[in-house]
Image (tube, rainbow, N blue to C red):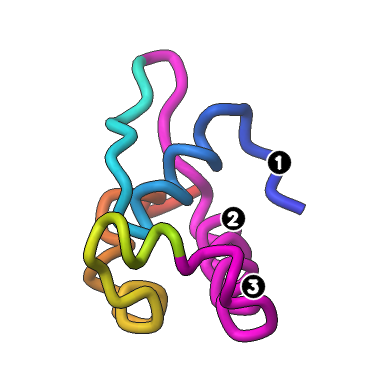
Amino acid sequence: TVTSRNPVPIKSALALVGMPGGACRPPLGRLSPRGLERLTGSLAQMHREAPSVLDPVASTFGVDLAHRLSDPAFRVGLAYDHY
């Protein structure tokens, strides 16, 4: 379970899969490094086990979800460096 306040995990998930969502405004911030790891893992598992759930994202936004979810470059700025 990711225990960050909504909308932090939602906006982070949008960013991970390539959808526009923007950053959270203060006082909300980012995920913890562990939270980001769990969120990324959950999205990757969903993409593997039920690809039809995220296929509309890939086709609408023209993204390669497997690449986005496996490449750490897409996680930059979504979590605090130290938590």
Mark 1 is on which residue type?
Answer: Thr
Task: Please identify the quarter of the rendering in which residue 74 is found.
Answer: bottom left
Please provide percent x and percent y for residue 76: 26, 59
SS of the residue under disc 2: helix
In the rendered image, residue 63 lying in the magenta stretch gets the answer no
Q: Residue at x 40, y 74 (%)?
A: 69
Q: Which residues are magenta?
A: 26-55
Mark 3 is on which residue type?
Answer: Met
Mark 2 is on which residue type?
Answer: Gly
Q: Residue at x 54, y 67 (%)?
A: 37
Pointer 3 or 2: first along the chain: 2
For mark 3, what is the residue? 46
Q: Residues within 10 Å of mark 3 (few under 14, many from 20)?
A: some
Q: Is residue 29 above or below residue 60?
A: above
Disc 1 to disc 2: CB gap under 8 Å = yes
Foreground: disc 3 or disc 2: 3
For mark 2, what is the residue? 35
Pointer 3 or 1: first along the chain: 1
For mark 1, what is the residue? 3
The overriding secondary structure of the stretch rendered in magenta is helix
Q: Residues within 10 Å of mark 2 (few under 14, many from 20)?
A: some
Label 3 and label 2: CA atoms lie apart by: 16 Å
